[in-house]
Image (cartoon, rainbow, N blue to C red):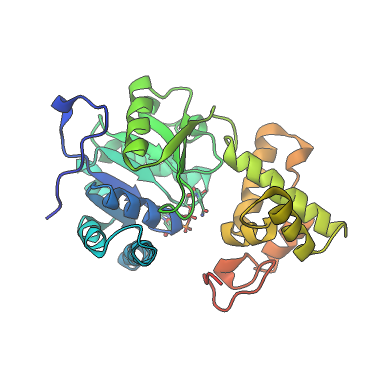
Amino acid sequence: MSAPGPALEGSDPRESVQRRVFVVGAGIMGSGIAAQCALSGYPVTLEDVSEELAQRGVDHARRAMDHAVDRKRIGPGERDAALGRIDLAIGLRRADTAQIVIEAAPEDLALKRRLFSELETATSPSALLASNTSSLPITSIGQELHDPGRLVGLHFFNPVLQMALVELIPGHRTRPEIVETARRFATSLGKTVVTSADTPGFVTTRAVAVLINEAAWMLFEGVATRDDIDTAYKLGFHHPMGPFELVDLVGIDTAVAILDVLWDGFRDSRYRACPLLRTMVSAKKLGRKTGEGFYRYPSPGGTS
Ligand SMILES: NC(=O)c1ccc[n+]([C@@H]2O[C@H](COP(=O)([O-])OP(=O)(O)OC[C@H]3O[C@@H](n4cnc5c(N)ncnc54)[C@H](O)[C@@H]3O)[C@@H](O)[C@H]2O)c1
């Protein structure tokens, strides 16, 4: 049986309803978001299209928490209690009791629009609807909703338990009280919140896309080697990872998809994806998830 969720910091104590979180998509981000919410005391339902995928998400959440225990960031008791707060679901039916819904399905505008149309009817009208999109404008995701005022962007970072930032993106129709609830919710997870206007890529994705693309162009043009470019970014700018290490972690397909969203949104040549990135996608060298990108990895999804 799940414990009641915490009251959101700064919220009116009279609204001390049980804050249940429903996470759509149990992949890299959904499982991390579920782990973070559960560790912060929220009962969480982690949903995907099949039981196998939802269970894989719970396993991923467990591994993320095990890592936090190994690093002594949390105790084993906290981990076990948090795992007890996560249950899984297939389909959106069980979203009806959630007050906070976070969508972490693939970065596909049509898919996200469809999911939110379904979520709009599957949830209570007072529930907050959030997308974890890393690049798609929130207003565009919500354009087919009857009440787009409920939808907001809450952009978490990978790995969720380790990354302190959440980007908050109010859409053009988002109601102020939904923005405020989203801010308080992210803060209650221990995250620092920055707010971005609803433009493609927001602040962070736009910044990192250009950084990665410029590195790919330099390699493509023969300006420097992969290792020298990665070393230059790390030692020259104190970046913890070089751009090729980073894009292997993010996924080269994801990086190209993001550049295409920025290109569509701004029609600015800054966002013209380097052909080298597209070739690597065609070759299925997507980074860590396929075992090879700019670097090789011992096993797909591996971390070394
Ligand atoms: N990977 C990152 O570093 C990162 C960082 C920040 C934001 N994001 C964003 O988060 C979102 C998810 O990215 P991810 O990397 O976790 O992707 P992922 O591919 O790891 O996970 C997506 C999950 O959604 C599931 N899914 C697909 N269709 C679904 C449906 N109709 N209903 C429910 N679940 C469905 C898939 O089965 C999969 O488990 C994207 O919008 C992405 O842009 C990703």
- Looking at the image, the residue that sits furthest to the right is 222
Q: Residue at x 60, y 74 (%)?
A: 297
- Looking at the image, the residue that sits furthest to the left is 1
Compared with 73, 173 (above or below) is above
Q: Residue at x 62, y 65 (%)?
A: 287
Q: Residue at x 40, y 53 (%)?
A: 161
Q: Residue at x 66, y 52 (%)?
A: 256
Query: Considering depth in this image, is 123 or 38 the residue closer to the camera?
Result: 38
In screen coordinates, is 127 left or right of 15?
right
How many marks can you see?
0
Q: Position of residue 192 (x, y in %)?
A: 43, 37
Q: Position of residue 69 (x, y in %)?
A: 33, 64
In screen coordinates, is 176 left or right of 80?
right
- Image quarter where the C terminus lies is bottom right
Compared with 195, 100 (above or below) is below
In screen coordinates, is 169 left or right of 151?
right
In screen coordinates, is 187 left or right of 16?
right
Query: Considering depth in this image, is 74 or 158 the residue closer to the camera?
Result: 74
Compared with 126, 57 (above or below) is below
Q: Position of residue 270 (x, y in %)?
A: 76, 39
Judge whether residue 242 can be spotted in this image.
Answer: yes
Q: Quadrant of residue 1?
A: bottom left
Q: Quadrant of residue 83?
A: bottom left
- Looking at the image, the residue that sits furthest to the bottom is 298
